[in-house]
Amino acid sequence: MDQPSDLVTSPKPVTDAGPVVTTSSGQVRGAWRELGSTASLGRTWRSAAFLGIPFAQAPVGDLRFGAPVPPEPWDGVLEATEYGPTPQRQTLSEITLIPEPSIPGESTLNVNVFTPAPTTDSSLPVLVYIHGGGFTAGSPAGPWYDGAAFNRDGVVTVSVSYRLGFDGFGRIEGAPDNRGVLDWLLALEWVQENIAAFGGDPERVTISGQSAGGGAVLTLLAMPRAQHLFTAVHSISGAIADVTRDRAQTLSRRLAVLAGVEATRSGFATLSEERILELQQTAQEPEGGPEAPFAMMQRFASEGLALGPMVDGELIVRPTLDSLRQGIGADKPLVLGTADDEFSMALDGVKNKLRFIPARLLLGKAGLKGDARKAYMAANKDVGKRGTAAMLGRYLSDSMFRAATVRIAEARLAGRATGSAGTWVYRFSWRSPVFGSAVHCLDVPFYFDCLDGERVDALAGATPPRLLADDVHGDAVALIVDRNPGWPSYEPGSAQVKVYDTPSSVMSDGYASVRPLLNR
């Protein structure tokens, strides 16, 4: 494909009249953006952005805490040139390294479509991206999620919003469970019904996401009801919630007590979003009050997230791994992996204090003891040489993310049958010069090929490697277009893993260092 020699990943607006597309609810007008030019052909590259298109009615009033309802049709042409309101109601720059703005307003259930060929084709593959944020934060309006680079490579890109926190995932008497999951399903149904009008092929839809978004696509992969809505999956640092009904009920009751309301739909409806946002954090804290970062991460590593997709026995019929072992989603190609040191940065503020404390002692306090601790330390000698904080951070990363990658890959092997698709596993090992390790979110600008994007330098330094972005993004495009990212699939006995670094490589059993944690 003849690509622009000077692609801009912060697209430049074009003054031409924006294209108009007809959706199932009415017409929408987007805006053209210039991506760059190809000097050899004298060609200017551009794509169109359609922002803030509602896929559901505003979840307010009687619709709050309800299942999402498709939008009412509108007359005339809806101007889709600015991002729509977001369910995120606060800026969480101190928590996330990805710029994800909060946009006020009621119509928070919307999609953003980026396409190189609106109204002229219906055969391009489609990427649908679900943002992360621990199921309580994040925004599809983040500039890194602009589909410019994927558009350059012939992929229509869609980013979606969904209800967050207690509004999206809290267990509420009288309300449907897993409202955030229902939002994902309706957004994907909108894609099936409408994406051809934007140049996309509804039979070639890859779903992708990072962190909670990576967990979201794994949840969907293992959900019988979702199987007809996509054809491939790419999970980046996926965090599966699989919250139990009992745990969700306990959180709901505690939040109701804190608020002084009944733990029912009518009771919670008396609380503003802002009040619930405040109380849901308090309700998740231990009785003693707020925790230090390490204690919080340790608790998440052992207990998992308290707000997120719940195993309700109906929509999510069983835990994700159990469904994968039964072969649900086995016909869908899956790429998954993590960064090497997802949450090591949580210990940066105390690493000097930790350097004189033996790592084995702190690993014991974190719950790793006996033969498992001995084997784990032996398997991670290279990390131990970087100090106690590095070892403890790797253990947290392994417990919360990296061990799950192996469990998922092996569950897929157990559920494999004739006609099953491949599973490909990777590690993102390139160390940020800012943090000295491969931390959470670091791979996202490489995935979207937006290295000159807003605040990328704060995460990846002033000169992140161009060739690494070509590799990560190129493999993503290969999955979307060809259903195969291009390295050997994960198989028994070899467990081949792509290691993204400078240079990248493929190694056998690339997650061997987490195996001491798998059978505890």
Image: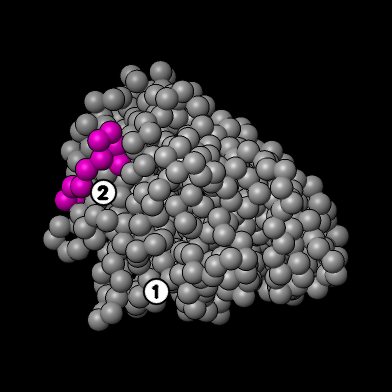
Image quarter (top left, top right, bottom left or bottom right) of the C terminus:
bottom left
Residue 426: x, y in percent?
A: 30, 50
Q: What amino acid is found at the position of numbered circle 2 in the picture?
A: Lys
Crowding at mark 2 (Cα within 10 Å: few <14, some 14-19, many 20+): many
Q: In 3D space, how far apart are the residues under numbered discs 1 and 2 (Cα atoms)?
A: 22 Å
Query: Which residue sits at x=55%, y=80%?
Result: 314
Position of 310 with respect to 337 (left or right) is right
Q: Nearer the viewer, mark 1 or mark 2?
A: 2
Q: Nearer the viewer, residue 290 or 480?
A: 480
The residue carrying mark 1 is 329
The earlier-in-sequence mark between 1 and 2 is 1
Circles 1 and 2, Cβ within 8 Å, touching? The answer is no
**Range of magenta residues:** 500-509
Position of 359 with respect to 259 (left or right) is left
Q: Nearer the viewer, residue 153 or 387?
A: 153
Query: Which residue sits at x=49%, y=41%?
Result: 42
Q: What amino acid is found at the position of numbered circle 1 in the picture?
A: Gly
Give yes or no for residue 506 being in the magenta stretch: yes
Above-or-below relation of 429 to 65: above
Query: Which residue sits at x=34%, y=64%?
Result: 482
Crowding at mark 1 (Cα within 10 Å: few <14, some 14-19, many 20+): many
Instruction: Place residue 112 in its image quadrant.
Output: bottom right
The total number of labels drawn is 2
Query: Which residue sits at x=71%, y=74%?
Result: 24
Instruction: Place residue 424 in its image quadrant.
Output: bottom left
Position of 351 with respect to 58 (left or right) is left
Position of 34 with respect to 409 (left or right) is right
Q: Nearer the viewer, residue 364 or 375?
A: 375
The residue carrying mark 2 is 498
Residue 479: x, y in percent?
A: 37, 60
